[in-house]
Image (spheres, rainbow, N blue to C red):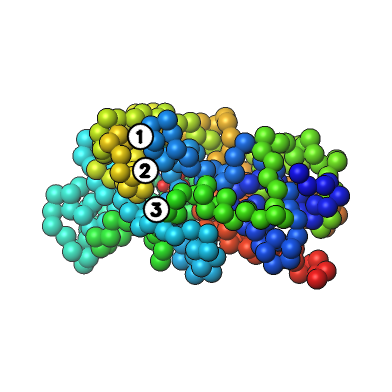
Amino acid sequence: MIDKQEIDLLIVGAGPVGCTIAERAAQVKGWKSLIIDKREHIAGNCHDCINSHGQLVHKYGPHYFRTSYEDVFRYLSKFTSWIPGNYIVKTSVKNKLYPIPINLSTLEKYFDQELDEDTALKLLHSLRVHKENPKNSEEFILSRLGKELYEDFYLGYTLKQWDIHPKDLDPSVCGRVPIRLNRDESYVNATHQVMPKDGFTKMFSRMIESKNIFFKGNTNFEDLKKTIIPKIATVYTGPVDEYFNYCLGKLPWRSLQFEWKTYKEKLVQPCVQINYPNDHKYTRSVEIKHVTKQNINTSTVSYEYPQSVGDPYYPVPQPTSTELYLKYKQLVEETSHKDKVYFVGRLAEYTYINTDEAIKRGLDAFQKIANSNGID
Ligand code: UDP
């Protein structure tokens, strides 16, 4: 184990941000990092592992890696080779499966008519509820797709996922899912849509394979912060309100619970994910084997139940929580200077970002730390 006096960076959280900063610090500067995590394992919510049936599963929900940042893709490619993303999702509406994101084929099937880009555009134009500047997720979808599609494809899913009405959520929430007038069926828009060949955990473990990086799981920051004073800085990637002992009140976080079922079939779903906007208590079922392509005779499917208690997965993008976060941000600014703490990532910046964006923020934060401590 590393000597306490020798720690250059204390990194709280072994997720994408923590691993990226530790890797850069070791590689570029030769700095020694101690990464701690409350959980026993690395990779944060990207953690994947082999279950008792030999299936590689995403323990905290599916991570469909995608990026249009060439620098992020190049950087991660040093630690993994890739397999194709194959991120095809369908949504179950009135017992029929439709492509989601909504595309030409979805519209044709739903309205039972042949369409091309022009006729689909005209159709959507006739359905749209005009809103000059959509102020929330309901207005955003109504202004693009109209009432019927909004109610069948978005409303129920959003209520289940957030327990908040779409009219109280930022437009960017429902806006995450593209709307297309072509037949592209991929769930996401990005230049690279890929999955690490041996899994996320393996990729992150290769990143932190260095004599200058130490990982300690099952460890709370609270228990260490008085005894470990890093020579250069602390990188905090946990929930921002927790860092400040909830002194301004608790930020809302959305969590998930998973039910896992293993079937004695090679595959049980037609694609990796099926969304259930209007049926069941779960939002989606995920059979990650469609992407991993494991050659195995059984298949594991996860069913996702959103909940308000449990580990934080999602910040809640609504005006009241943004307001509270901005108050915490003032404390962050004071603390960053005073105690040399960098707050980085989804939980520390209370921001609904994807894995590639977290890596990007990790790379940028490392640069910032390196620049302000130029002691080569
Ligand atoms: N959404 C929806 N219907 C769907 C899929 C998504 O209403 O079939 C909305 C819902 O509010 C969800 C948001 O769009 O929380 C973002 O969806 P995404 O699949 O990107 O969520 P994530 O994968 O981050 O959980």
Question: Which quarter of the rendered picture does the C terminus lie within?
Answer: bottom right
* Residue at disc 3, CB closer than 8 Å to ligand 1: yes
Q: Amino acid at mark 1?
A: Thr
Q: Residues within 10 Å of mark 2 (few under 14, many from 20)?
A: many
Marks 1/2 in contact by CB < 8 Å: the verdict is yes
- Callout 3: SS: loop
Distance of mark 1 from mark 2, alpha carbons?
A: 8 Å
Q: Earlier in the sequence, mark 1 or mark 2?
A: 2
Which quadrant: the N terminus? top right
Which residue was labeled with disc 1?
300
Q: Which mark is residue 177?
A: 3
- Could you tell which of marks 3 and 2 lies nearer the N-terminus? 3
Q: Position of residue 315 (x, y in %)?
A: 57, 44
Q: Nearer the viewer, residue 228 or 165?
A: 228
Badge 3: how crowded within 10 Å, few (<14), some, or many (20+)?
A: some
Q: Does the CB distance between marks 1 and 3 fall below 8 Å?
A: no
